[in-house]
Amino acid sequence: MRDSLNEFQVDNGSLYRRARLWMFGLLGCIALDLGLSKLPGALADLFDSHALALLALAALCSMFLLQIGYFYFESAYENIRIDIRLLALQNVWKNSALSYDFPKRKLVRYTLGPNSWGRQKLTLYLMGSLGEVKKLKSMDITFLSAEKRANLSAALEEIVQGNAEVEG
């Protein structure tokens, strides 16, 4: 959402929240299936094959393979803030949640496009304290809509061009 030339914000929070609800719902289906199969009587016979649990597990595995993640980008005033979280590995893998906060004037260039797997990646290049260009970790923005990716690209291009005018 663009309020002025200096402020821009984009995220995929609603998709991420829906994916989390699906993940917890599928985990609940697995627990329900396993619990109902332990009950005595005819109800347990329906859940002996654990078809519900296996189906939910297959859906969880496909969510894991999709690597649905949260992406938040904000450029307000003189800073850029980026938050990234992976849905499936949020509490397991140390790099599943990253956060960047840096001055806009350090942004030298960026690349935005598909990688070899076809996933949309954003890579930022920042000016270091000694004048060297540092590459930040590539960020997966596959689950941003095409419109949000275009707006993000326009905002980053505006920042890079503004920095080039100030330097040159």
Image (cartoon, helix red, strand yellow):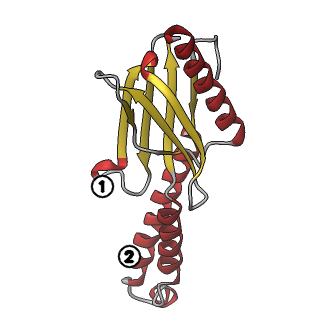
Check residue 35 in the rendering and tell me which mark sits there, or answer none.
2
Instruction: State the image coordinates of residue 4 (x, y, percent, origin top left).
Output: 64, 10
Instruction: State the image coordinates of residue 77 (x, y, percent, origin top left).
Output: 49, 10
Q: Amino acid at mark 2?
A: Gly
> Sequence order check: which comes first, mark 2 or mark 1?
2
Image quadrant for the N terminus? top right
Q: Secondary structure at mark 1?
A: loop
Q: Are marks 2 and 1 in contact (CB under 8 Å)?
A: no
Check residue 145 in the rendering and tell me which mark sits there, or answer none.
none
The residue shown at (63%, 31%) is: 153
Instruction: State the image coordinates of residue 124 (x, y, percent, origin top left).
Output: 47, 34
Q: Is residue 3 above or below residue 143?
A: above
**34 displayed left or right of 144:** left
The residue shown at (40%, 38%) is: 136
Instruction: State the image coordinates of residue 18 (x, y, percent, origin top left).
Output: 56, 49
Mark 2: few/some/many CA within 10 Å (<14, 14-19, 20+):
few
**19 displayed left or right of 153:** left
Q: Is residue 114 above or below residue 123?
A: below
Q: Is residue 76 above or below residue 52?
A: above
Quarter where residue 115 is shown: bottom right
The residue shown at (48%, 70%) is: 61
Judged by depth in the image, the label closer to the viewer, 2 or 1, is 1
**Which of these two is toward me, 106 or 53?**
106
Q: Name the residue beneath numbered marker 1.
A: 93
Q: Secondary structure at mark 2?
A: helix
